[in-house]
Image (cartoon, helix red, strand yellow):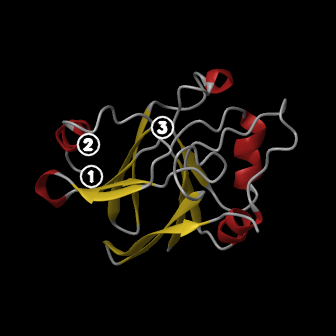
Amino acid sequence: MRVVVTADTHLRREWPRRRLPRAAEAWLERADVILHAGDITQAEHLDQLGRHAPVHAVLGNNDRELTGALPETLELTLEGVRIGMIHDSGPVRGRAERLHAGFPDADLVVFGHSHIPWDGTGVDGQRLFNPGSPTERRRMPHRTIGVLDLADGRVVDLRLEVVDDP
């Protein structure tokens, strides 16, 4: 199963020139499932993602219009891999312990908020992953998206893909 992981897209109808990079769209076209770790901002953008594949999303701090429509946290199982999702994982110090406490049974925890791509191992080997942002790189050198391949109850491959348009 191919899972495309994104967060912090910050798409807004008031900013019609902001869009997902073509490279991100290309990955979305190949997705079986899409995970969005918050800050998509408006329902029509969730619908846009949903044209590619089923979307599972959590509420971000900029998702005011989606309050009540999206959960703050989400737990799901895909191809036997238990996944937890939250937007803001809090400060780096204590992150692994907090995420493990919040998602004790998750094999992988996906989060966003910082726009900083991050792939690491937490408590008891729990994998922690932030895909960065495909639209607002901020201080990072590139816009990024996550690509996750799952099979037989395990993460076969998890990587960051640069989605900067030329």
The crowding category of the residue bearing disc 2, from other C-alpha atoms within 10 Å (few below 14, some 14 to 19, many at least 20), is many
Identify the residue under disc 2: 103
Q: Secondary structure at mark 1?
A: loop
Identify the residue under disc 3: 113
Q: Residue at x 58, y 67 (%)?
A: 162
Measured Cα–Cα span from mark 1 to mark 2: 5 Å
Is the residue 57 above or below the residue 26 in the image?
Answer: above
For marks 1 and 3 on the same chain, the one whose residue lies earlier in the sequence: 1
Q: Are marks 1 and 3 in contact (CB under 8 Å)?
A: no
Identify the residue under disc 1: 106
Q: Secondary structure at mark 2?
A: loop
The crowding category of the residue bearing disc 1, from other C-alpha atoms within 10 Å (few below 14, some 14 to 19, many at least 20), is many
Asked whether 47 or 139 is in front, the reply is 139
Q: Secondary structure at mark 3?
A: loop
- Identified by mark 1, the residue type is Ala
Is the residue 112 above or below the residue 118 in the image?
Answer: above
